[in-house]
Image (cartoon, rainbow, N blue to C red):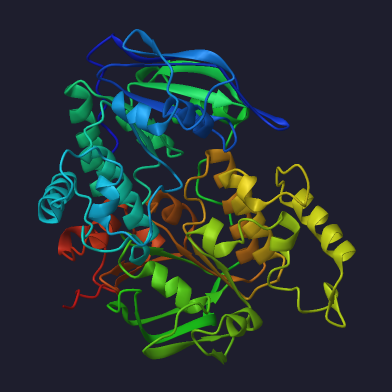
Amino acid sequence: MFEINWGAMNQEVAVRMTGIVKRFPGVVANDGVNFEARVGEVHALLGENGAGKSTLSNVLTGLYRPDEGTTELNGVQVSLASPRDALSAGIGMVHQHFRLVPTFTVAENIVLGEKNKNLLINASEVCARVEQLSTRYGLAVDPRARVWQLSVGEQQRVEILKVLYRGAKVLILDEPTAVLTPQEADTLFATLRAMAKEGRTVIFISHKLEEVMAVSDRVTVLRGGKTVGTVETLSTSTRDLARLMVGRELVFDRVVRVGMSEPSNPVLEVSNISAYDDRGNIAVADVSFVVGRGEIVGVAGVSGNGQRELAEVLGGMRPVIAGGFEVAGIKVTAGKVRQSIKAGVAHIPEDRLHTGLAASHSVEDNLVLKSYRHKPVSKFSVIQRKIIRRHAVELIERYDVKTPDSATPVRLLSGGNVQKVLLAREFSADPRVLVAASPTRGLDVGAIEGVRKRIVEAADRGVGVLIISEDLEELLSMSDRILVMYEGRIIGDVPTVQATREAIGLLMGGIVTANTGISNAGITEPQS
């Protein structure tokens, strides 16, 4: 995997952005940014969270008007005043934070806003075309399902399909492989290359440097709102790109553990759990496993195979229809959030901004969401604001949260800083068990390094850690064992020392064969 790279086929410039400046109160998000993408190339855009990537993309897609600078498409200067202008000009973007209507179906979201000469939309034709695109690009999703019923990963697939449906000539994809198996990611890369060969321009935003090296022709790096430079992919390396992004060396090796895991000393025991998803279908089917004290157990699987529902059961957000779990020998009632919190379960959900945090509330309020009923935060049922603020300032400094102040609403922070707020709250509660769903999804390499460090430190203190992620490199570098979920069941329980990227990827696709390179121990045939 990741070994093939093709050169750009055309030197004609499709997009040229010159001297782009975009200011917000107290912040210069883009400070004279220059960016150029050619016809027929895949161009990667890299940078830390808050480096200005999203702002630049929003300027190109008409969501923001630049304060200074110009944009040219195929040599013609344009003024994109709205997303409709950008779509009309042939520019489409898959955003990191989705632009979907939860109560609408997948098909309705895909055609929403599309110009149609007829008064009525032929739903059957739309669904058929969506299913055709889904099959062609390996982006499985039910066009008749409502968006609120879908996992975060499935919603991302809808966004990709929406852009493909509208036939954009310039495609901007923000973390498009976050919910794909390695094999599916390779298929997507081949698709992107085919699009580029057809004359499209693909702008690929990703924090996975191996992906950037595999699929892109050139890479532009942003840091602190400015352009650091543009390099040919064939003439650079992941280490060089990381250094450009963060301005220092980063270590990419397997994380070093200080403490020792104790698999024989369980802190989390899950016994025959089954649970429904939001659509009333079985999402978790007879799942059992154990996490020992100080052990890091990874859960691999394509999004939509029950991982999110499993995490929600352990976090107290979803009831079970069978089975149960214990924390440090104490039985916990599923579906009771306060019971999970009291038992010592810290939960980092995959949708950090809407499920993990209260987006419109301040940083300081979010940091005490789980402790405001107790001393010293609350005394005689009266909130102690000074104590809350002092607590927030301490955690902001300890976790390096970049925010104007503790009263700033969380929704105004960058993705990396939102995740830091969530981590600060969960870790400061001194948990026994940490359930982390996609803890580094959408973060840059610098932020990823910090998140992984915090998780490993928690395990070294004796916390049992369950990491649910579609990022196999992350699981292989951090976990002691990897569980593989497929169609709601665990079909593999593999020591990391025996695991390979290709073998786990096959299991994620439900393929259990002798050719996986994993011993038969811990492998369970999928059941229908």
Measured as percent of width and height from the top left, residue 110 is found at 26, 47
Front one among 327 and 148: 148
> How many numbered tags mark residues here?
0
Q: Is residue 130 above or below residue 55?
A: below
Q: Residue at x 53, y 40 (%)?
A: 444
The reply to whether residue 198 is visible in this rendering is yes
Q: State which quarter of the image contains the N terminus.
A: top left
Residue 504 picture quarter: bottom left
Determine whether, in the image, residue 157 is placed left or right of residue 33: left
Look at the image and tell me whether residue 19 can be seen. Answer: no
Residue 257's spot in the image, x, y percent? 59, 58
User: Percent position (x, y) of residue 385?
Assistant: 86, 64
**In the rendered image of this protein, does residue 129 appear above or below residue 369?**
above
Residue 507 location (% of width, % of height): 25, 62
Q: Is residue 474 left or right of residue 51?
A: left
Classify residue 233 by image quadrant. top left
Q: Is residue 523 left or right of residue 155?
A: left
**At 83% across and 81% down in the image, what residue appears?**
381
Location of residue 305 with respect to 475 vertically, above or below = below
Query: Residue at image x 17%, y 59%?
Result: 515
Q: Could you tell me which residue is drawn at 24 percent across and 19 percent down?
A: 40
Out of 73 and 436, give the one closest to the viewer. 73
In the picture provided, is 413 more to the left or to the right than 512? right
Residue reaching furthest to the front: 119
Residue 329 placement: quadrant: bottom right
Which quadrant does the C terminus fall into?
bottom left
